[in-house]
Image (spheres, rainbow, N blue to C red):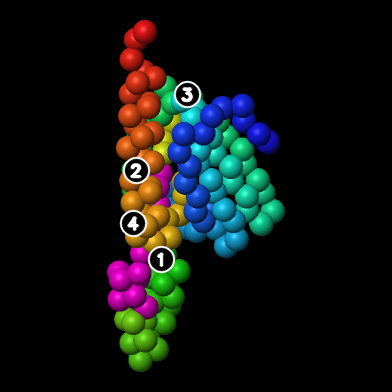
Amino acid sequence: MNSPHTVLLEISGQAANSYYNFLSPAFMGKTTLQLSETRLIERTRKMVATRYCEVLLSEVDSAEITEDGMSWLLALGLITLWVFGIGLIFIVLYFIFKYKYLIIRSGSNVQVVCIANATAMERARTFMVEVLSKSEQAKLPK
């Protein structure tokens, strides 16, 4: 699906799953967020699903960058805790290794991109600032 809007800024990363406010990277998948003058456009491809979403910038409520531990490490740590304390290693790793996400909320809609590295983190911060700036401009009375 091609959008007729001119893309001002774009960021891509690993797709993410959001279940009951818990985030996890999708096993296979990619999400691309594009910022145009009036809309935020999301394209997500996962192993068996695709999503295309356009949100008016005037509807954007908030944006955030968050870090979250790898929940499977915590679960594995709790399960193996009784095995000579091996679980402690997994629990410590849970607090060391974290996934980073760019999250943009608008009403009941949420766009999430998993951020891979420091370079992508800077691009995510720039993207977040631009989305919020354009959103503020779109909400001003004309």
- Tag 4: residue type? Glu
**Spot occupied by residue 52 in the image (x, y as percentages of width and height):** 61, 38
- Please indicate, yes or no, whether residue 20 appears anywhere in the rendered image: no
- Mark seen at residue 124: none
Q: CA distance from mark 3 to mark 2?
A: 17 Å
**Residue kind at label 3, given as amino acid type:** Thr
Q: Earlier in the sequence, mark 3 or mark 4?
A: 3
**Which of these two is toward me, 71 or 40?**
40
The residue tagged 4 is 67
Q: Quadrant of residue 1?
A: top right
Q: CA distance from mark 4 to mark 1?
A: 10 Å
First in residue order: circle 3 vs circle 2: 3
Mark 3 or mark 1: which comes first in sequence?
3
| Mark 4 surroundings: few (<14), some (14-19) or many (≥20) residues within 10 A | some
- According to the picture, the residue beneath numbered tag 1 turns out to be 70
Q: Secondary structure at mark 4?
A: strand
Mark 3 is surrounded, within 10 Å at the Cα level, by few (under 14), some (14 to 19) or many (20 or more) other residues, namely some
**Disc 2 from disc 4: Cα separation:** 17 Å
Q: In terms of secondary structure, where does tag 2 sit?
A: helix
Describe residue 24's horizontal placement relative to residue 88 as left or right: right
CB within 8 Å, label 1 to label 2: no
| Residue labelled with disc 2 | 126
- Mark 3 in CB contact with mark 2 (< 8 angstroms): no
Secondary structure at badge 1 equals loop
Q: Amino acid at mark 1?
A: Met
| Residue 83 highlighted magenta (yes or no) | no
Give me the disc on residue 38.
3
Describe residue 36's horizontal placement relative to residue 119 as left or right: right
